[in-house]
Image: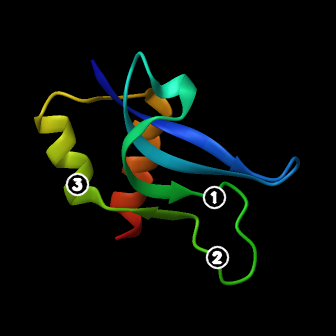
Amino acid sequence: MVVIRLARFGTKHAPKYRITVADSKKYVTKKYIEVIGTYNPTPGGTEKKIVLDLTKANEWIKKGAQPTERVKHVMKLAQAQA
């Protein structure tokens, strides 16, 4: 099963997330199929909150990938932002 999920990176008190497409059995070991965007919950300065390729995300969903609840929320924010 393929999932679209958030993968945390960044520093200890400043989290950032990559929006990744991964096999549900291998995502714990950081083996992604594709990185389709980033999400920064606390952007500073000129940083963008959401950078997401919506066409790739929709293609993966059509192929059967299941987005998590948080990714669904981020996708709605990205659509409103565009």
Q: Amino acid at mark 2?
A: Glu
Identify the element where label 3 is drawn. helix
Q: Nearer the viewer, residue 26 or 18?
A: 26
Labels 2 and 3: the sequence-earlier one: 2
Q: Label 2: which residue?
A: 47
Name the kind of residue labelled 3 in the image: Lys
Separation of disc 2 and disc 1 at Cα? Answer: 8 Å
**Label drawn at residue 40:** 1
**Residue positioned 33% across, 59% down in the render:** 79
Q: Residues within 10 Å of mark 3 (few under 14, many from 20)?
A: some
Helix, strand or loop at mark 2:
loop
**Direction from residue 72 to residue 59 in the image, left or right:** left
Q: Compared with residue 1, is residue 2 higher up or lower down, i.e. above or below?
A: below
In this view, the residue in front, 12 or 74, is: 12
- Taking the spot 42% from the left edge, 28% from the top edge, the residue there is 68
Rounded to the nearest angstrom, the CA distance separating label 1 from label 3 is 19 Å
Is the image coloured rainbow, by chain, by secondary structure, or in one colour?
rainbow
Q: Which residue is mark 3?
A: 56
Q: Which corner quadrant holds the C terminus?
A: bottom left
Give the crowd class for mark 1: few <14, some 14-19, many >=20 residues within 10 Å. Answer: some
Q: CA distance from mark 2 to mark 3?
A: 22 Å
Residue at point 11%, 37% (across, down): 62
